[in-house]
Image (cartoon, rainbow, N blue to C red):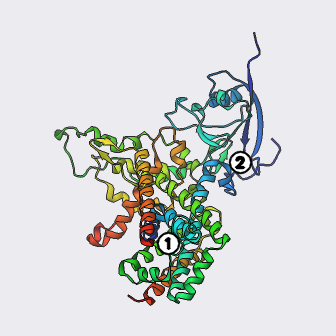
């Protein structure tokens, strides 16, 4: 061969846009993105605490802001984020636990996930019921 | 191999994530949708009288503090790692911005709740 | 006799001394209902282009040699069938997240070093004489580690793991699954020696629970479970270490 040879080197491929290459990764990034929703809600609540500490008038100003259409729309988006977070959280939960055996048989991941979802539904219903009782 | 300090942030991430998974949807529904619209829950549920009483109660303070701060630490931990996933350089500055943000929320919330007294 | 069916195979070729970067090359090959992708590659090498380079050995999904990206997913080429990839073209490239040495061959040295670092062998709790006889194990004790012992070191999980792709120092799913295989074996007493690997940033703490590793594993090892259950173990070790004497602190 007359062509000149390069010094041999392994080729390293780029990771740019890696998460767009597969639907599995897109779903993962959406799961991680729910954190933005959790953060926004935490900031809203923090603002609420500050407004509460500043007195009744400022507190009612914060409540009024929550009554605007933009705020309700934002909270609908946050609700979607929270629900998707809860769904995916309990999907991963079995992976973070050691293998659980009951009566000599292994408890399946699906059972643990469904248990988590059930706990979330029960907790949410209980909290709403508590709020309703508090306001009655 | 050097031991990582990740467990500190991971435990906070886990606690906040569990709380958000169990109570997040209901909290958003109550504070941001049902009460403002007066739909299903009275529109005056979050009156000053009620919330001030809740925030002045020791247990109420603890609940508000834990919900707000654990949500913040959970979110910032995930956001910090997502920045890395997106290919951004996540050095000390990114860490400071993210966890510093969670710390800010923690401090502001603590000061606010304590200033309301008991 | 009817014409044999054909399918187009596109391979990402790379020669380390001739090429600045990889480039696609197309081949058209005959196939039938039981032709695997590996058989397709072997046809190309035998009949069309002897320069095509790839690893393979057992042809039956047990040696772990033939991992590659087939239509963008990490798979064993001996275990993937052309009948399922129709109408084609079938895109084949070297396993993702590894440096390409040539064509479909990747640099696997890093993986091997990491495997060595976790002491992948039974470390007895105390010395045991032959006269003591064999270890006895209940079915439940076996179930605690059997799944992780199915690993064939094929590295598909590394090709699936974006955190490994972003940070090649990550110990990674396969090696950590094997670490768990030994820690979970009732015959093993080496957990303490393996803790520093778990506790490092490049140990369990680079894992973000993406979970794709467990999806692609041809042996259903579930490395995601192995890694993530050890986050709690590592965290417990982190917080409780000061209750232990200094020499047992795994620093």
The tag on residue B73 is: 1
Helix, strand or loop at label 2? It is loop
Return the chain for callout 2: C
Q: Of all residues shown, which one is farthest toward the front?
A: A136
Return the chain for callout 1: B
- Image quarter where the N terminus of chain A lies is top right
Residue A62: x and y in percent read 58, 81
Q: Residue drawn 76% across and 41% down? A: C24
The one of C232 and A23 positioned closer to us in this rendering = A23
The reply to whether dot 2 and dot 1 touch (C-beta < 8 Å) is no
Q: Inspect this view and state whether residue B115 appears.
A: yes
Q: Residue drawn 68% across and 26% down? A: C43
Using a 10 Å C-alpha cutoff, classify the residue at mark 2 as few (fewer than 14 neighbours), some (14 to 19) or many (20 or more).
many
**Which picture quadrant has residue C164?**
bottom right
Q: Of all residues shown, which one is farthest toward the right?
A: A2
Q: Inspect this view and state whether residue C116 appears.
A: no
Position above or below: C235 against A23:
below
Residue A77: x and y in percent read 62, 63
Position above or below: A73 against C26:
below
- Image quarter where the C terminus of chain A lies is bottom left
Q: Which residue is mark 2?
A: C16
The one of A64 and C15 positioned closer to us in this rendering = A64
**Which picture quadrant has residue B43?**
bottom right
Helix, strand or loop at label 1? It is helix
Q: Of all residues shown, which one is farthest toward the left?
A: C131
């Amino acid at each position: 061969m007359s062509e000149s040879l390069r010094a041999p080197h392994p080729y390293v491929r780029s990771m740019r846009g890696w998460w767009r290459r597969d639907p599995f990764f897109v779903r993962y990034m959406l799961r991680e993105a729910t954190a933005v929703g959790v953060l926004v809600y935490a900031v809203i609540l923090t603002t609420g605490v500050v407004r509460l500490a500043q007195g009744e008038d400022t507190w009612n100003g914060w409540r009024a802001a929550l009554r605007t259409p933009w705020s309700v729309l934002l909270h609908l988006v946050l609700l979607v984020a929270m629900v998707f977070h809860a769904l995916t959280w309990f999907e991963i939960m079995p992976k973070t636990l050691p293998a659980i055996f009951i009566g000599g048989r292994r408890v399946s991941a699906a059972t643990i996930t469904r248990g988590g979802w059930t706990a979330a539904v029960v907790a949410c219903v209980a909290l709403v019921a508590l709020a309703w009782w508090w306001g009655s | 191999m050097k031991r990582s300090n990740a467990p500190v942030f991971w435990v906070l991430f886990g606690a906040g994530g569990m709380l958000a998974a169990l109570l997040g949807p209901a909290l958003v529904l109550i504070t941001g949708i049902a009460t403002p619209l007066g739909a299903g829950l009275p529109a005056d549920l979050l009156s000053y009288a009620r919330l001030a009483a809740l925030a002045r109660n020791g247990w109420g303070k603890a609940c508000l503090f834990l919900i707000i701060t654990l949500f913040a630490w959970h979110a910032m931990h995930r956001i910090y790692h997502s920045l890395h996933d997106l290919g951004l350089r996540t050095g000390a500055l990114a860490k400071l911005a993210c966890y510093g943000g969670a710390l800010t929320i923690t401090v502001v919330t603590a000061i606010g709740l304590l200033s309301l007294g008991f | 006799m009817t014409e044999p069916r054909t399918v187009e195979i596109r391979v990402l070729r790379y020669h380390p001394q001739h090429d600045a970067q990889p480039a696609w090359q197309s081949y058209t090959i005959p196939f039938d209902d039981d032709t695997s992708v590996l058989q397709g590659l072997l046809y190309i090498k035998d009949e069309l282009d002897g320069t095509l380079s790839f690893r393979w050995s057992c042809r039956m999904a047990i040696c772990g040699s033939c991992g590659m990206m087939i239509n963008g997913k990490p798979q064993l080429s001996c275990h993937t069938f052309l009948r399922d990839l129709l109408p084609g073209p079938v895109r084949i490239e070297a396993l993702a997240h590894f440096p390409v040495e040539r064509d479909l061959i990747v640099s696997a040295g890093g993986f091997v070093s990491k495997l060595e670092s976790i002491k992948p062998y039974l470390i007895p709790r105390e010395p045991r004489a032959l006269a003591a006889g064999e270890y006895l194990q209940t079915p439940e004790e076996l179930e605690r580690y059997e799944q992780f012992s199915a690993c064939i070191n094929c590295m598909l999980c590394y090709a699936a793991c974006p955190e490994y792709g972003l940070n090649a120092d990550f110990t990674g799913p396969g090696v950590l699954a094997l670490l768990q295989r030994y820690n979970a074996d009732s015959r093993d007493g080496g957990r303490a020696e393996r803790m520093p690997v778990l506790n490092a940033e490049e140990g369990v703490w680079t894992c973000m629970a993406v979970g794709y590793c467990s999806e692609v594993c041809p042996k259903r090892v579930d490395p995601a479970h192995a890694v993530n259950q050890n986050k709690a173990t590592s965290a417990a070790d982190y917080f409780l270490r000061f209750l232990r004497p200094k020499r047992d602190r795994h620093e």
